[in-house]
Image: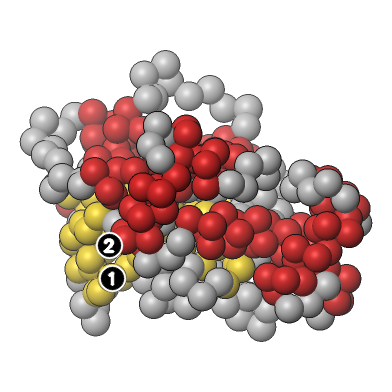
Amino acid sequence: MGQTILTDNCNMFSLEENEQLIPGGVANFLLSDTKGLPVFPPERYSVKPNLPFFFNGLLMGVCVKGEATVSINFKKYTLKANSTLIVQPSLVCRIEKQTKDFAFEGFFFSFNFFVGLVLPADFRILFQISRHPCLEVGEEDMAVLRGYYRNLVDRYQQTHLAYRVQIMRGLLYAMLLYIVSLYKGNETIRYSGTQTRQEEITAKFMTLLNDYYKTNRTVAFYADKLCISSKYLSQVVKTTTGRPVLQWITDRVVSQAKVLLRTTSMSAFQVADELNFPNPSFFGQFFKKHTGTTPYKFRRS
């Protein structure tokens, strides 16, 4: 489901079925352009670089030149040359600004890409990286990481290579392990700033939304999960993102409905069932209200 769904304030996309949408594409894997944005066929898909993006996988790569300010779940970080970047699943990410010579080499991918590979027992460190998404590394380590990157891109382009996906999976896995090893060996990492209580609540809401949007669409549900009142959650999310909670919930459901309609052969009945609508009629009314068109017309457009 690699299509980018554009709402007024966010680029949303999923990674599962890129092989169906991109010539030579690979499921659960997507290349980044030199500015850190996902690469889709321009004739069918577009990303608005001035808007944040939200997706169900990781962004991982290295800055090879220049500098950029990156906002991850409303916190700003500086990405410099010879630095790595890991943005974890279901986080709102945005390239706030960058120098003219900024250049990035990286990938978007889902953990599903590593099906069949065994993660180290102490791999929980990956979830600690959220506090330090940018890491400066030495030139020797950067050369190693860029070698992995170039090799992976070369294999990606060899669309008729036997075991192409398996080779790519191994290379990306090795690159990820190398970056995580650099984190484990770095004793000077310090938390770059503190997260306000409101930002923390909003970040947790975004994670919960990605987990429960198919089955729970009320502010009260998410507020209860966060042990706060619905009114307070609404105020916090509106303040930190500029958008109401219900708008985030609605857009997440609509974006997934669009993905399913455009990239699968599922009927409207099946899509309604997948998204836990009581019946296809209710789903059709919901979809038309928020998109201005019916599921059938959207699929054929």
- 235 or 54: which is nearer to us? 235
Task: Look at the image and tell me whether residue 164 can be seen.
Answer: no
Residue at image x 58%, y 46%? 218
Q: Nearer the viewer, residue 75 or 38?
A: 75
Asked where in the image residue 110 lies, by quadrant, the reply is: top right
Furthest residue toward left = 188
Q: Would you say the residues marked 2 and 1 are in contact, meaning their CB atoms lie under 8 Å apart?
A: yes
The one of 145 and 199 positioned closer to us in this rendering: 199
- Measured as percent of width and height from the top left, residue 159 is found at 69, 59
Q: Identify the residue under disc 2.
A: 70
Q: Secondary structure at mark 2?
A: strand
Give the SS element for disc 1: strand
In this rendering, the answer to whether 250 lies above or below 213 is below
Is residue 44 visible in the rendered image? The answer is yes
Q: Using the image, determine if residue 46 lies above or below residue 240.
A: below
Crowding near pointer 1: few (<14 within 10 Å), some, many (20+)? Answer: some
Q: Amino acid at mark 2?
A: Val
Task: Rate crowding at label 2 as few (under 14), some (14 to 19) or many (20 or more) other CA atoms within 10 Å.
Answer: many
| Type of the residue with mark 1 | Glu
- Of residues 293 and 185, the one nearer the viewer is 293
- Residue receiving disc 1: 96
| The N terminus: image quadrant | bottom right
Instruction: Please state the horizontal and vertical placement of residue 153, each as a whole percent of the image.
Output: 51, 58
Which residue occupies the extreme top position in the image? 121
Residue sitting at 13 percent across and 48 percent down? 193
Of the residues under marks 2 and 1, which one precedes in the sequence? 2
Between the C-alphas of marks 2 and 1, the distance is 6 Å
Identify the residue at image location x=27%, y=62%: 70
